[in-house]
C-alpha cells in the first residue's frame, strides 16, 4: 500500500500526517519509484509552516529522495526496473513510500554511495557545488567565511572549499562546535555569540576582510557578514535559519563596492544536462574524498514531525532522514 505525509494546513510539525495515497500507471516518460530513504531539509520546514507558499495544499512535501524503480513508462530509454536512483525536485512529493517521477529528474547512484549518505547529503552537496562553482568562482588565494560551519551545508562547504586549497574561516553558535568546525577544514573558527566576529575576522585576515561570505543564517548574521568583507567582496546569502534578512539599502554596498546574491538551488538545476553534470561531480567528490560526516539518524516516515522538531531545535542538522 502507498502512503504519504500530506499537509492539509500550514502549521507546526503536527500538521505532518501519514495518509494512504493511490498512484496510476507511469505515463510515457515517467518512473514509478519505491523510496528507500528520504531527505529532510530546512526548506521542508518553511513549506510546512507556510513561510514559502510553494506547495499547493493539500500536498506532499519533500524535495529529495533515493529509491528503486519499480515500473517504467513506455517512452523511458535510460532506466530499467530495479535501478537505484536519487533525485531533487522543486515539485515536492518526496515524503512518500512511492511516487511517480519524470525520468529526466532521476540519476543513477554509484553502488559505493549508500542511501543514508545520499539522503542526508545530496541536496546539500549540490548546493555547495552551486555556491562554489556557479555563484562564485573562488581561487586558491581567497579567504572565505562560512556561517554555521558545523551545520548540514556548512560542514560540506568547508570540506569542499578546503579540498580546493581555500582558506576557510567558520562561525558556530557555541564552543562545543569549534573542534567540529576545525575538523571540517576551518583554519579559524569563531563562536558567534561572542559578538566580536568582525574584529576576529579582521585579525585573521590582517585587517583586509574576506573575499566571500557564505551566509545561511540570515537575519542574525547578515550585518556582520557584510562588515567582514574586503573591498569588492561578495556576500552570498543562501539561507535564513534565523529568519529572513531585512531590506538592504544599495548605498550600503557602495561603501566597499560589495555584491550580494541570494541563490536558490532549484534555479541552478532547471537545465537537465547541468543538473546531471552537477550530480556526477558530487558523486565524484564523495567517492574521492574522505569526508567527515556525522552519524545519521533515521526515523520512520510516519514520524516526519519528530525530524522537523529536531531540526528546528538546532540539533541533528544534515544527519536526519526518513525511511518509508
Ligand atoms: N539556497 C538554497 O538553494 C539552499 C539549499 C540548501 C539549504 N539552504 C538553506 O541553508 C540553511 C542551512 O541548511 P542546512 O541544511 O545546513 O541546515 P542545518 O543542517 O539545520 O544547519 C543549520 C545551522 O544553522 C545554525 N543556526 C544559527 N542560527 C540559527 C537559528 N536561529 N535557528 C536555527 N539554526 C541556526 C545552526 O548551527 P549553529 O548552532 O552552529 O549556529 C544550525 O546547525 C537553511 O536555511 C536552508 O534552507 C538553502
Image: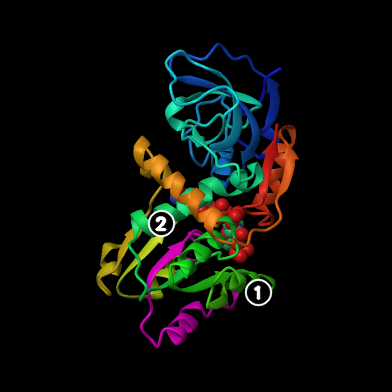
Q: Work out whether residue 240 can be spotted.
A: no
**Residue 54 in the image: above or below residue 80:** below
Left or right, 281 with respect to 34, comes to left
Left or right, 210 with respect to 101, comes to left
Q: Which residue appears at 53% of the width and 44% of the height?
A: 43
Q: Measuring from the top left, give residue 240's x and y in whole percent.
A: 50, 54
**Mark 2 neighbour density, 10 Å: few (under 14) some (14–19) many (20 or more):** many
Q: Start and end of the magenta stretch? A: 193-221
**Residue 19 in the image: above or below residue 296:** above
Query: Tag 2, which secondary structure?
Result: helix
Left or right, 86 with respect to 210, comes to right
Q: Is residue 315 magenta?
A: no
Q: Is residue 200 magenta?
A: yes
Give the number of the disc on residue 131: 2
Q: Quadrant of the C terminus?
A: top right
**Residue 211 in the image: above or below residue 77:** below
Q: Which residue appears at 53% of the width and 58% of the height?
A: 288
Of callouts 2 and 1, the N-terminal one: 2
Identify residue for label 1: 179
Q: What is the CA distance from the residue labelled 2 to the residue labelled 1?
A: 24 Å
Q: Measuring from the top left, give residue 184's x and y in whole percent.
A: 58, 68
Give the number of the disc on residue 198: none
Amino acid at each position: 500500500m502507498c502512503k504519504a505525509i500530506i499537509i492539509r494546513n500550514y502549521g507546526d510539525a503536527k500538521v505532518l500526517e501519514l495518509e494512504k495515497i493511490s498512484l496510476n500507471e507511469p505515463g510515457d516518460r515517467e518512473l514509478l519509484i519505491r523510496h528507500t530513504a528520504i531527505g529532510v531539509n530546512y526548506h521542508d520546514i518553511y513549506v510546512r509552516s507556510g513561510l514559502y507558499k510553494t506547495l499547493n495544499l493539500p500536498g506532499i512535501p519533500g524535495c529529495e529522495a533515493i529509491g528503486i524503480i519499480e515500473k517504467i513508462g513506455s517512452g523511458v530509454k535510460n532506466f530499467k526496473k530495479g535501478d537505484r536512483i536519487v533525485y531533487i525536485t522543486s515539485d515536492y512529493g518526496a515524503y512518500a513510500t512511492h511516487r511517480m517521477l519524470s525520468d529526466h529528474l532521476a540519476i543513477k547512484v554509484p553502488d559505493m554511495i549508500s542511501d543514508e549518505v545520499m539522503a542526508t547529503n545530496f541536496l546539500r552537496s549540490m548546493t555547495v557545488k552551486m555556491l562554489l562553482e556557479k555563484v562564485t568562482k573562488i581561487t586558491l588565494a581567497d579567504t572565505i567565511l562560512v556561517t554555521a560551519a558545523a551545520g548540514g551545508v556548512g560542514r560540506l562547504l568547508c570540506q569542499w572549499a578546503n579540498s580546493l586549497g581555500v582558506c576557510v574561516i567558520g562561525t558556530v553558535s557555541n564552543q562545543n562546535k569549534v573542534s567540529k568546525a576545525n575538523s571540517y577544514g576551518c583554519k579559524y573558527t569563531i563562536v558567534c555569540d561572542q559578538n566580536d566576529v568582525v574584529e576576529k575576522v579582521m585579525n585573521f585576515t590582517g585587517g583586509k576582510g574576506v573575499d566571500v561570505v557564505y551566509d545561511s543564517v540570515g537575519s542574525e548574521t547578515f550585518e556582520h557578514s557584510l562588515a567582514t568583507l574586503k573591498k569588492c567582496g561578495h556576500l552570498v546569502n543562501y539561507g535564513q535559519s534565523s529568519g529572513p534578512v531585512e531590506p538592504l539599502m544599495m548605498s550600503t554596498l557602495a561603501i566597499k563596492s560589495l555584491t550580494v546574491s541570494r541563490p536558490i538551488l532549484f534555479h541552478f538545476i532547471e537545465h537537465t544536462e547541468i543538473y546531471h553534470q552537477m550530480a556526477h561531480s558530487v558523486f565524484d567528490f564523495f567517492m574521492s574524498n574522505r569526508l567527515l560526516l556525522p552519524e545519521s539518524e533515521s526515523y520512520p516516515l510516519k514520524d516526519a514531525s519528530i525530524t522537523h522538531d529536531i531540526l528546528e531545535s538546532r540539533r541533528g542538522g544534515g544527519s536526519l532522514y526518513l525511511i518509508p
